Image (cartoon, rainbow, N blue to C red):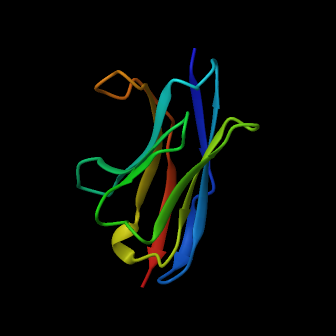
Amino acid sequence: QVQLVESGGGLVQTGGSLRLSCAASGRTFSNYAMAWFRQAPGKEREFVARIIWSGGNTYYADSVKGRFTISRDNTKNTVYLQMNSLKPEDTAVYYCAARVVTASTYQNWGQGTQVTVSS
């Protein structure tokens, strides 16, 4: 059973940085895509970034391109989201998600971690 545990959220000022971590367990992830999504109060959950575990191919939402970086550490089975130049509109609960590369939807989700950016 896949388990995803996020950490690293918190309160930061505009322009600051945070690094989120997603510890993955329960299986080998070499054929998985891992992603970060976020949900702000009163809004729908939105895609932030994705990485293909094998090969490291990445893809970003336009709203975070150039500011956020997704990466993974194979030895620790952990996916990271480095967030720089944070803005108040980045305030949300951030979720880690996983899917088999060939799947069209994300089947596994973490519990989320709160990121708050103060102006």
Rendered location of residue 119, percent (x, y): 42, 85
Q: Quadrant of residue 67?
A: bottom left
Determine the image quadrant of residue 42. bottom left
Horizontal side of 87 relative to 56 (left or right) equals left
Residue at the far top: name it: 1
Is residue 25 shown above or below 23? above
| Quadrant including the N terminus | top right
Q: Residue at (41%, 26%) from the top-left corner? A: 101
Q: Residue furthest right?
A: 75
- Between 9 and 27, the one lying in front of the other is 27
Give left or right: position of 24 versus 57. right
Residue 95, position as x, y percentages in the image: 46, 44
Residue 44 on image: x %, y %? 23, 48
Is 72 on the left-hand or right-hand side of 106?
Answer: right
Q: Is residue 82 left or right of residue 49?
A: right
Callout count: 0
Closer to the camera in the image, 16 or 27: 27
- The residue sitting at 48% across, 79% down in the picture is 85
Residue 72 coordinates in the image, percent (x, y): 62, 45
Residue nearer the viewer, 92 or 65: 65
Q: What residue appears at the point 23 percent right and 54 percent down from the top-left corner?
A: 43
**On screen, residue 44 above or below 13:** above
